[in-house]
Image (spheres, rainbow, N blue to C red):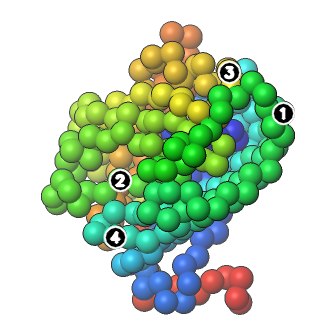
Amino acid sequence: MMFHPRVAQVIGSAFALLTAALGNRAHAEGKLDASYTISFARIRVGDISATGVFGESEYVISARGRAGGIMKVLVDGEASFSTRGTVKDGYPVPTTFTSKIVSDAETSDVTMVLDEGSVKELAAAAPTKSDRVPVTQANRQGIVDPLTAMLFSAAAAGEGLHRDVCRHTLPIFDGQQRYDLKLAFKRMDKVTAEKGYAGPVVVCSVSYEPIAGHRAYPLVKYLSEGREMEMALAPVAGTRLLAPFRMLVVSALANLVIEANQFEVTAQASTVADPKAQ
């Protein structure tokens, strides 16, 4: 999921080892520390860790992950991602997104500035590939970055977990690729992390539709072949947001599973100092 954007996106580029900080006036309400294991054919092939700080009006998420081993046929390498934005009417709205991906296939750096869902500035250092589907200006509007896409607002669905949080099509742009994740309600379930959250989750079915900027990566083909995919969302205590707890991609040969072994939310003081300033 983090080693190559394709998994990061589809699963939620969701999370990784990192440090996240809001500014001194953030008035943070909660901090999520999460770590995930990536397994393929029940063999551990990678790790993801992430931290999110969620305030009354701002949020920051950073993540880092790596994968390899028998996953090399699909994806191999490591990556880091970060995003920050504002919270408006209970919904996360990204303002900046950065990523760095290093794999056998390529290395890329992306810095993106967004305004109300449109890309205003984009710096993407990566070799031009003539075999990519061209990204148009329209592909850079009405979008969300991969990390923010993995935050789901319960504001429209009322209190608690509700099937309506799955009724979304996520228009994601990571600075190089534009794709949709189409979600639908599947079931309610219960999960237990080794450390942190234990309780109900809402499970959404997920379909992946590449739109622009992609090449015929093995993983792109693997994910867009109509495979059965699902994402389990757990509540981020103290907020009206939900985040991925588990992602499953079903295959006739072997299942790809990304699941949290740590999913802890702690209350934060009204100010969170930037560690770079210390």
**Which x, y percent locates residue 192?**
38, 47
**Which x, y percent locates residue 187?**
24, 33
The local secondary structure at tag 2 comes to: strand
Among the two numbered marks 4 and 2 on one chain, the one whose residue lies closer to the N terminus = 4
Among the two numbered marks 4 and 1 on one chain, the one whose residue lies closer to the N terminus = 4
Disc number at residue 152? 2
Give the labeled residue for mark 3.
216
Disc number at residue 104? 1
Residue drawn at x 58%, y 87% as measured from the top left: 273
Q: CA distance from mark 4 to mark 1?
A: 39 Å
Q: Is residue 212 or residue 150 the one in the foreground?
A: 212
Q: Is residue 54 or residue 256 the one in the foreground?
A: 54
Amino acid marked by disc 4: Lys
The local secondary structure at tag 3 comes to: loop
Among the two numbered marks 2 and 1 on one chain, the one whose residue lies closer to the N terminus = 1
**Which x, y percent locates residue 206?**
39, 31
Question: Marks 1 and 2: in contact by CB < 8 Å?
Answer: no
